[in-house]
Image (spheres, grey):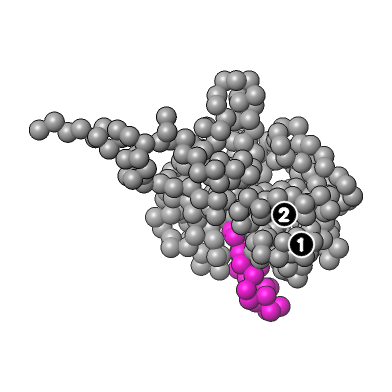
């Protein structure tokens, strides 16, 4: 007998019928950068189509994002001033706190997530408090819990600790529960690698470390078993969603984490992944829209339920048109 798998690829309608993996607009979370000022829409050179926005411009963007059907945004703040403790990160009138309140006022059904970290706010650019030239893990935990609480008080639906300090999910969960924010969720950057794909983000958020690197707290790209360990710790400590970052170089890790938990799994399609596609598309070397959708499909196929991606608006426009670039060619 001749086996002919091509029978199931013969027409676009048949391909639609047997399609295994789907991307929905509901799967997308849009990252965005917010700064002080008014009427500010500052382009980010390495991230074509993205801007550092003042709060008044941010709420307009939130309305646009919501109109496309994208259900959620994650906020990254740029402070007025930095210091060794990153104090604006947990100030009641900090930029993220103002932004959360403004979005919830204008687009109340939008799910708002907030990055909980210190790197944008400290003058040294590291994700924790420095003592004797080293990151002090346990002192940092207290600050992170203050940041998370201030975001919850402003109205955030989820706080998203991205610092990779040991024990921070437990401390944040305990703080939120103690202060009555039982319903505030935690999206844990459970598996965050010390990756070379973060360059454009560091430009956008002005958060490159001023000395050394982040390899003592972010994960070694060589390690897979450790990723499962990190994910399971965060689950035990109270995380509601587990995230892997970056996405494309770590599809195997997404798959393994998915196999080891029943919680929703998110993946961060990071700035370097976005910038490469945009740059190659501008050069005419690739067809950017097709590559974008294939990338997002691969992340879903690996096992991610949710994708944080700078492509969210572009992808939503494709999906809302009902276009299927895999079955029509």
Q: Quadrant of the N terminus?
A: top left
The verdict on residue 181 being magenta is yes
Q: Secondary structure at mark 2?
A: helix
For disc 2, the marked residue is 63
**Front position in the image: 162 or 101:** 101
**Which residue occupies 29% across, 33% down?**
10
Crowding around mark 2 (Cα neighbors within 10 Å: few <14, some 14 to 19, many 20+) is: some
* Residue 266 at x, y percent in the picture: 53, 53
Q: Position of residue 209 (x, y in %)?
A: 75, 42
Asked where in the image residue 213 lies, by quadrant, the reply is: top right
Can you tell which quarter of the image residue 163 is in? bottom right
Furthest-left residue in this view? 1
- Expressed as whole percent of the image width and height from the top left, the position of residue 311 reads 61, 41
Q: Is residue 16 visible?
A: yes
Residue name at image x 76 percent, y 36 percent: 44
Residue furthest to the top in view is 284
**Helix, strand or loop at mark 1:** helix
x and y, in percent, of residue 185 in the image: 61, 67
Which quarter of the figure is the C terminus placed in? Answer: top left
* Sequence-wise first label, 2 or 1: 2
Query: Relative to 169, does residue 216 appear above or below in the rendering?
Result: above
Q: Is residue 148 visible?
A: no
* Inter-mark Cα distance, 2 to 1: 8 Å
Q: Nearer the viewer, residue 233 or 179?
A: 179
148 to the left or right of 9: right
Q: Which residue is mark 1?
A: 106
In the image, 207 versus 74, the foreground residue is 74
Per the rendered image, the range of residues in magenta is 166-188
Question: Magenta includes 258?
Answer: no
Question: 61 left or right of 190?
Answer: right
For mark 1, does the 10 Å Cα neighbourhood hold few (<14), some (14 to 19), or many (20 or more) residues?
few
């Amino acid at each position: 007998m001749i086996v002919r798998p091509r029978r199931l690829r013969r027409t676009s309608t048949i391909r639609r019928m047997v399609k295994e993996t789907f991307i929905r607009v509901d799967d997308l979370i849009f990252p965005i950068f917010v700064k002080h000022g008014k009427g500010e829409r500052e382009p980010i050179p390495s991230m074509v189509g993205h801007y550092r926005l003042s709060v008044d411009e941010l709420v307009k963007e939130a309305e646009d994002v919501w109109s496309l059907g994208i259900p959620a945004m994650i906020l990254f703040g740029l402070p007025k001033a930095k210091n060794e403790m990153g104090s604006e990160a947990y100030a009641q009138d900090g930029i993220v706190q103002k932004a959360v309140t403004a979005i919830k006022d204008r687009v109340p059904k939008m799910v708002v997530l907030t990055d909980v970290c210190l790197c944008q706010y400290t003058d040294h650019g590291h994700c924790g408090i420095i003592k004797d030239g080293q990151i002090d893990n346990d002192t940092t935990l207290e600050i992170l819990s203050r940041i998370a609480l201030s975001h919850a008080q402003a109205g955030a639906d989820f706080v998203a600790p991205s610092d990779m300090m040991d024990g921070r999910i437990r401390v944040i969960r305990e703080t939120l529960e103690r202060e009555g924010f039982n319903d505030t969720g935690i999206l844990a950057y459970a598996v965050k690698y010390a990756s070379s794909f973060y360059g454009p983000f560091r430009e956008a958020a002005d958060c490159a470390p001023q000395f050394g690197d982040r390899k003592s707290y972010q994960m070694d790209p060589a390690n897979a078993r450790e990723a499962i360990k990190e994910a399971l710790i965060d689950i035990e400590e109270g995380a509601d969603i587990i995230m892997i970052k970056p996405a494309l170089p770590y599809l195997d890790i997404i798959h393994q984490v998915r196999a080891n938990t029943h919680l929703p799994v998110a993946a961060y399609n990071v700035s370097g992944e976005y910038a490469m596609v945009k740059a190659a598309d501008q050069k005419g070397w690739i067809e950017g829209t097709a590559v974008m959708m294939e990338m997002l499909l691969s992340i879903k196929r690996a096992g991610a339920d949710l994708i944080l991606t700078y492509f969210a608006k572009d992808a939503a426009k494709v999906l809302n048109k009902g276009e299927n670039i895999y079955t029509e060619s």
